[in-house]
Image (cartoon, rainbow, N blue to C red):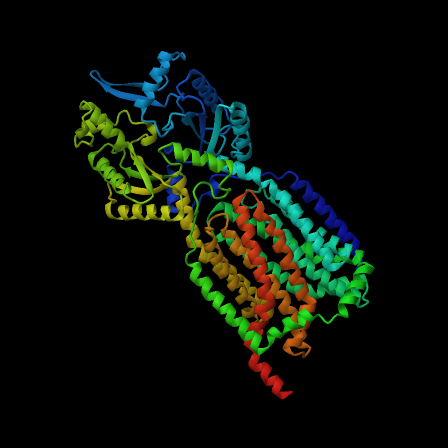
Amino acid sequence: MRVRLPLIILLAVVTAFFAWQASQLKPDASFEKMLPVLHPYIQNFLKRQDELKGLGNSVRIIVQTTEDDIFTAEYQDLLKRITDEVFYVKGVDRSALQSLWTPNTRWMEVTEEGFVGGSVIPDDYDGTERTLEKLRQNVLKSGQIGRLVANDFKSTIIVAPLLEIDPETGERLDYRRFSQDLEKMVRDKYQSDTITIRITGFAKLIGDLIEGATLVGLFFLVAFAITAIMLFIYSRCGWLTSAALLCSTVAVVWQMGLLKVMGMGLDPYSMLVPFLVFAVGVSHSVQIINRFGHFIYHKVSRVEAARLTFIRLSKPGFIALVSDGVGFYTLRVIEIPVIQELAVVAATGIAVLVLTNLILLPLVLSFTGVSDRCISYRSTKAHTRFRHWELLARTTRRGPALTIIGVCAVLFAGGLYYGQFQKIGDLDPGAPELRPDSRYNRDNAFLTENYSTSTDVFVVMASTGVQQCSSYEFISAVNYFQGVMNTVPGVQSAMSVVDVSKLSIQGMNEGSPKWHEISRNRFILNNSLSNAPNSLRNTDCSMVPVILFLDDHKADTLSGVVAAVEDFAEQYNTDAHRFEMAAGNAGVEAATNIVIRDAQTKMLLWVYGVVIALCLLNFRSLKITACIIVPLVLTSVLGQALMAALGIGVKVATLPVIALGVGIGVDYGIYIYSALLTQMRNENSLEKAYFYALKYSGTAVAFTGLTLAVGVGTWMFSPIKFQADMGLMLTFMFFWNMLGALLFLPALVWLFNHRQLEAQSTTR
């Protein structure tokens, strides 16, 4: 033990280094990280990303007046200034920026002299009544009412497509800074008693999430305080409490520092992982300080107590941590970069715990020892009959065991039944990551209520040969596709270059409604498409986007649209034309839902496969492995049923909870069964062996389960809804895994060993 001091000094130096690295860690978010990049839909989108400007990552800035309407000199002057301001916000694709004051917003009409048109803002605009009236007429002719201009003429939209990579620096778009720039340069600067600024879009959502995620630190402190208080109540020793908290906190510092060393950051979806690492660390620390205190109480020296604690708990602790880490790492099977990074973040934190909690904690305890108050408290406990543990130990008898197994079987069946109603994807309108009354969701609701076009855009790419997008066969196919999609439930409307062609042909025929149709004449079609905006076809005329505006992005809506497009493509795709998904925010979400649906079962199989393999490797028994795993399976099934009952969909934010719950829950079973096995080898009866196992490990498991459940339960008050959902699910899983380990596990032990136990009883 001569290396104790040098080893602690070395670990302190490493901690200082990682603390310095962690201090430089920055929030990291990216639109592309949210994309399931290997899915065919997203590959189609990425291949044509440059041809779909404005249909990918963009924000919409709504400038609303509460007085008069938008056709006043004051409002137009303000809109022009805001448009110019947005033009210079870092990250905006300036070439695709659109508002009433950009030259790409145009009007067109048919006169006796033919087609005439121009920019919506008159060339001679000077703010007088004459030019304002001219502006009003241009807006009415532009086709932008319900798109850029509200139906009640009380607001207009500035559409700002974004550049994911800065072409000058090559750096990723900083979503937090971009959101702050919008707030500072637009909302704070121009919002007043008569003007309201509203902002929607993925970048603003992520920015708000990052801002809200700073509250994670507050919730961490609350959970830290709750854990500290309950640890002290449990141990009655300041040294044991401080050592456990210190080593678990060191693990978080190491994890954060390692992320910076690996060139990674924390996005809004992985910001909660450090607390989970802290929770797992506390779970193992409680077992260690409990066993260390036991040895000290029996007059063992501090150094020897630390050594014996390491010997007794290093193997089950290592197996449990490896199970946690590998279980978390299996999230990598989900081919969405943000989840794959979360897997690395979680697995890195668990790997660190092997050093900080299994090695550093016993070393620290060998110096601190325990207080006299702790020894006195343990003496009092030792002379107490532990009536509650005696009652719990009876779960290993025939009657209670069969009752518990029967109740769990009923719960399992009920969980399977209700779990089938679980949905993949979002179940609420707006941004489900935030509360319904959040500013972002209020802004999104305003846009939906006051504009004809939805914020949920699903884009189907209709492709053909080069310079063939004006052929009758292709235009006719697109026209028929639009008609079919307009009948699909959840689709508000469909728009494509076909609409421009029909309006042009109608205009060329004196505006007669009977000519609002596509023409078989190639020259007429070519002419009708000559004024089509670049956003509705690519440069070589080989692809046109069909834009579907949806009622919402709920799971059922997206699955219905995807099924309709797939059916149409299967029937009508030819060598001459093809309909391929998908772009737009709703198209990306549809692809994400499909990837999650396909990966959910695969992820669970990997998680349980790894945990089962490690349990078999440690205990070399199918029966023991089943006793540890079956309670976890019940928790997973009930967790899915709970999500279905509470209307929580399986998505990027909630899917990792399932794996995290399994990984953390396996600790309880491993520690309890290890203690039980030790007692049974001493030829104790099952009931007596379980009673002693509860005294040595059960108290720590019960304390850990309750403490972590209370700590994580504080997340339910978070303004970030997905954090509140995670808090609710993890609280349930922590608590239910604890019950499973304390009640269901011993009942299973009796079930798998009752014949052998009865034979031993008869022999005796």
Question: Which image quarter: residue 746?
Answer: bottom right
Q: In this orientation, does residue 103 appear?
A: yes
Question: Which image quarter: residue 524?
Answer: top left
Residue 568 on image: x %, y %:
27, 46
Residue 228 on image: x %, y %:
71, 52
Residue 669 on image: x %, y %:
60, 65
Residue 284 on image: x %, y %:
66, 59
Left or right, 260 with respect to 482, comes to right
Give 418 or 640, whichever is nearer the viewer: 418
Residue plotted at (69% across, 58% down): 285
Q: Quadrant of the C terminus?
A: bottom right
Give 715 or 306, whichever is nearer the viewer: 715
Tally of marks: 0
Give 329 or 186, whichever is nearer the viewer: 186
Residue 682's place in the image compared with 337, above or below, is: below
Q: In this orientation, does residue 28 appear?
A: no
